[in-house]
């Protein structure tokens, strides 16, 4: 089953090949670390360009949504994936940006009884979810150590992926380079005219991002990685030639505008480096999990099938699988509605979830 992810990756690459060449937004937008998805199409379980497999752990139970079902946990540099051993169509994709809290504590598994598990609290689109993952391999801390080290590294490399305003990115009038960053050009006399005021400063162009800071105050700065780019445009206005950088919809659909006597040169250089980046994104996460280098580890552990009750999820793959993980909507107070099906006043179910579907989950 380990080949499942690699097969999905090949299928995804083939599907997106032409879109990458055209810089289509569907292809260049990195959603994997920003979203939570349930029961994905097999293709989207594949690793996109720039996404790296950190570890793959077998014998992991999704205790919250599929208690009693063995599965695989896949840790990448952008997200956590889980899929059922029996039916990969039952799966999860949890982007690291959605994780608000991580804990290791006791839970009850149908396969192992009372055991330590990985608890994740998350938030996506104003809805809070909870996920619980339990290792079915006795005395194996790998589930916890691999994921915790990956998440720590992810949190320490945000400048590779996030738009930053007024950050600590400048020291002694120079851009502080990121690991593996190559600064190709520093343009003086570049106006940032993204707002009504406009400020003159220095523009840096590297293999990972563009960065700008004001002459008069280095704390007035921006850092924008190529991963958030949608397009680069040149335009003439009353001020002269300007360069407009549009941001992908997922990141807010805003833009940055710069003016310089070398606007044509700047636009051409950024466009060239952006195309190179799209083909081989640098997303910042460098994690070495020693155990992950040994794919035969799973065969060294005895797999016990006797005296195990495996309960098949009757409604696995349903479009509203998210309801099993939903903790609460992020509203100040719960709305109460009258249910004609139950003839009772009940708390309003999550969006697009019916009473019948909630009963099915139970």
Image (tube, rainbow, N blue to C red):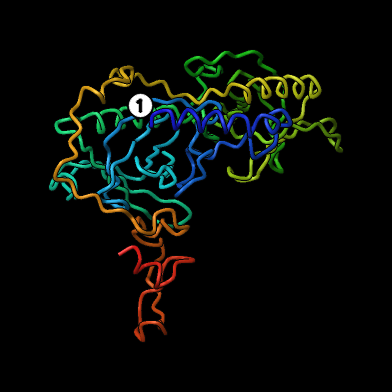
Residue 234 place in picture, x, y as percent: 81, 31
Q: Residue at x 53, y 16 (%)?
A: 181
Q: Quadrant of residue 31?
A: top right
Residue matched to label 1: 55
- 216 or 362: nearer the eye? 362
Instruction: Using residue 222 as the reference point, say whether residue 354 is left or right of it.
Output: left
Residue lying at the far front of the rendered structure? 306
- 216 or 50: nearer the eye? 50
Instruction: Using residue 40 as the reference point, say whether residue 224 is left or right of it.
Output: right
Q: Residue at x 67, y 30 (%)?
A: 20
- 262 or 79: nearer the eye? 79
Q: Residue at x 36, y 61 (%)?
A: 328
Q: Residue at x 27, y 38 (%)?
A: 60
Confirm whether residue 215 shows in the render: no
- 41 or 259: nearer the eye? 41
Q: Quadrant of residue 346?
A: bottom left
Instruction: Using residue 61 as the reference point, say whether residue 333 is left or right of it.
Output: right
Residue 158 place in picture, x, y as percent: 46, 31
Q: How many C-alpha atoms fall within 10 Å of the one at disc 1: few (<14), some, or many (≥20)?
A: many
Confirm whether residue 61 shows in the render: yes
């Amino acid at each position: 089953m380990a080949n499942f992810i690699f097969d999905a990756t090949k299928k995804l690459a083939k599907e997106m090949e032409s879109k990458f060449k055209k810089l289509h937004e569907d292809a260049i937008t990195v959603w994997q670390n920003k979203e939570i998805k349930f029961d994905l199409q097999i293709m989207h379980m594949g690793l996109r360009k720039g996404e790296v497999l950190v570890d793959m752990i077998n014998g992991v139970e999704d205790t919250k949504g599929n208690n009693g079902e063995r599965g695989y946990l896949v840790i990448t540099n952008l997200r956590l994936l889980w899929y059922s051993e029996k039916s990969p169509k039952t799966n999860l994709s949890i982007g690291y940006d959605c994780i608000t809290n991580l804990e290791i504590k006791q839970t009850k598994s149908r396969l192992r009884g009372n055991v330590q598990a990985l608890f994740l609290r998350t938030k996506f689109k104003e809805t809070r979810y909870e996920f619980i993952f339990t290792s079915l391999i006795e005395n194996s801390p790998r589930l916890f150590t691999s994921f915790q080290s990956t998440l720590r590294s992810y949190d320490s490399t945000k400048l590779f992926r996030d738009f930053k305003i007024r950050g600590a990115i400048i020291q002694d009038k120079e851009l502080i380079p990121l690991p593996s960053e190559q600064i190709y050009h520093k343009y003086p006399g570049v106006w940032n005219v993204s707002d009504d005021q406009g400020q003159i400063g220095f523009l840096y162009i590297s293999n990972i991002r563009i960065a700008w800071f004001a002459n008069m105050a280095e704390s007035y700065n921006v850092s924008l990685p190529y991963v958030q780019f949608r397009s680069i445009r040149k335009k003439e206005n009353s001020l002269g030639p300007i360069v407009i950088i549009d941001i992908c919809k997922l990141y807010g659909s805003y833009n940055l505008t710069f003016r310089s006597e070398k606007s044509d040169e700047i636009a051409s250089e950024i466009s060239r480096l952006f195309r190179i980046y799209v083909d081989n994104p640098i997303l910042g996460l460098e994690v070495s999990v020693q155990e992950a280098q040994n794919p035969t580890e799973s065969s060294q552990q005895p797999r016990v099938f006797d005296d195990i009750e495996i309960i098949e999820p009757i409604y696995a793959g349903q479009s509203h699988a998210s309801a099993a993980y939903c903790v609460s909507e992020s509203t100040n107070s719960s709305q109460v509605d009258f249910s004609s099906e139950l003839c009772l006043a009940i708390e309003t179910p999550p969006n697009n979830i019916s009473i019948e579907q909630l009963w099915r989950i139970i």
